[in-house]
C-alpha cells in the first residue's frame, strides 16, 4: 500500500465530536526522546562543524554535545516534569537501556510510558532487517521496563513501505510517524489490527526549532504558546492535542530549560487541560471512535 491507501482523507471539519471527562477540552502530550549516538560514527546532528569542513572521526565535540544531554540535560527535564506532575511518553532507542539505564529507570519510576524509537538511532531505510530490528527493540524495552510497548516513533520519523505492517505484527497500536492532523487518525495495515497515528509535533519540536532552524533559546516558549493558544481556542469545537517533543541535549541545557518550564506552566494553569501519555490517548480515542 502507498501512503494514500493507508490513510482515509477526513477534513478536520468532519471529525466526530470527542469528549474528555470533567469538562476538559485539550490534551497535553509531552514526548522526551532518548537516543544512542555511536562516537565512532558520523553523528546524526552537529552543533560544531569540523575544521576546514572536513569531517573527522571520532567526532568528539558533537558526540559530547549529545552525551551532555544524557548525563545532565535529561535530569533537568525529568525534574521540570515531575515538579508539575506531568507523565511523559519516553521515546527511546532500545540500546539506551544498555548505555544509560538510570535514565530509563527514573522515567519508569515517574510513570512515563515507554515508546519504541528504533533499536539504535538509524533511519528505518538503513536497517538490514526491519522485522528483527523492530522485534528486538520492543523485546529489549519491555524486558527492561516490565511495561507493554504499544507506540512507535521511528528515528527521523522514517518508514519504508513495509514498516507499518511489521510494527502491527509486533503489537504496536499507534505510531508517531504520521503528523497529519490535530487528532488521532486510523491507518490501514495488512494484519487488519487497529493502528492509529497520533499528532506528533514537527514544529513544536526542539530538533526543528533549535538544530534545524537555529532559533533563539526562547523559541520553544514563544512558538509553543502561540500553538497552544490557537488549539485551545479551537477546542471549543472539538478536543485538540497539544504535543511537545524535546531532547535532553537541546532543551535540557541551562539556557533553554527555563523556557520549557515556562511553557509547561502556561499550559497547565488552564484548568481544562488533560495530561496524557501516548497510551492514554490511544485508549481514550479508540474508546470513542469505532475502527
Image (cartoon, rainbow, N blue to C red):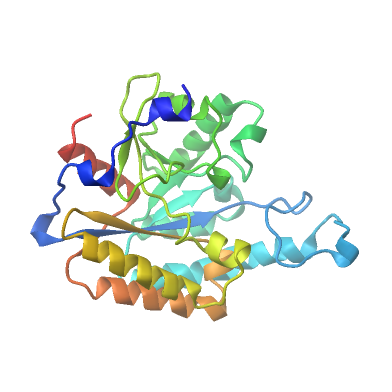
Q: Quadrant of the C terminus?
A: top left
Residue 83 image point, x, y percent? 34, 74
Q: Is residue 136 visible?
A: yes
Of residue 187 and residue 72, the one placed in the foreground of this image is: 187
Q: Is residue 167 visible?
A: no
Image height of 250 relative to 195, above or below: below
Which residue is at a point 31% across and 45% down the rendered structure image? Answer: 279
Residue 231, quarter of picture: bottom left
Residue 73, quarter of picture: bottom right
Image height of 11 relative to 237, above or below: above
Left or right: 272 as drawn, with respect to 9: left
Which residue is at a point 64% across and 42% down the rendered structure image? Answer: 122
Residue 267 image point, x, y percent? 29, 71
Residue 214 image point, x, y percent? 61, 69
Which residue is at a point 56% across and 39% down the rendered structure image? Answer: 158
Which residue is at a point 83% across and 63% down the rendered structure image? Answer: 50
Amino acid at each position: 500500500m502507498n501512503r494514500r491507501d493507508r490513510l482515509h482523507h477526513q477534513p478536520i471539519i468532519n471529525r466526530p465530536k470527542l469528549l474528555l471527562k470533567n469538562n476538559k477540552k485539550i490534551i497535553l502530550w509531552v514526548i522526551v526522546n532518548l537516543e544512542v549516538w555511536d562516537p565512532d560514527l558520523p553523528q546524526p546532528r552537529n552543533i560544531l562543524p569540523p575544521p576546514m569542513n572536513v569531517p573527522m572521526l571520532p567526532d568528539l565535540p558533537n558526540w559530547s554535545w549529545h552525551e551532555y544531554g544524557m548525563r545532565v540535560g535529561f535530569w533537568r527535564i525529568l525534574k521540570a516534569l515531575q515538579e508539575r506532575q506531568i507523565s511523559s511518553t519516553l521515546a527511546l532507542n532500545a540500546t539506551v537501556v544498555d548505555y544509560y539505564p538510570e535514565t530509563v529507570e527514573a522515567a519508569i519510576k515517574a510513570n512515563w510510558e515507554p515508546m519504541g524509537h528504533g533499536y539504535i538511532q538509524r533511519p528505518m531505510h538503513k536497517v538490514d532487517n526491519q522485522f528483527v530490528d523492530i522485534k528486538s527493540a520492543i523485546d529489549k524495552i519491555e524486558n527492561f521496563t516490565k511495561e507493554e510497548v504499544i507506540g512507535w516513533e521511528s528515528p527521523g520519523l522514517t518508514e519504508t513501505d513495509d514498516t507499518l505492517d511489521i510494527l502491527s505484527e509486533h503489537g504496536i497500536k499507534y505510531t508517531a510517524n504520521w503528523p497529519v492532523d490535530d487528532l488521532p487518525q486510523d491507518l490501514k495495515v495488512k494484519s487488519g489490527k487497529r493502528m492509529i497515528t497520533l499528532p506528533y509535533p514537527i514544529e513544536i519540536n526542539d530538533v526543528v526549532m533549535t538544530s534545524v532552524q537555529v532559533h533563539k533559546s526562547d523559541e520553544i516558549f514563544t512558538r509553543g504558546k502561540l500553538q497552544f493558544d490557537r488549539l485551545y481556542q479551537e477546542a471549543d469545537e472539538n478536543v485538540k492535542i497539544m504535543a511537545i517533543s524535546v531532547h535532553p541535549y537541546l532543551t535540557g541545557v541551562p539556557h533553554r530549560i527555563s523556557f520549557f518550564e515556562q511553557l509547561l506552566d502556561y499550559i497547565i494553569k488552564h484548568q481544562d487541560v488533560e495530561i496524557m501519555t501516548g497510551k492514554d490517548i490511544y485508549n481514550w480515542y479508540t474508546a470513542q471512535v469505532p475502527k
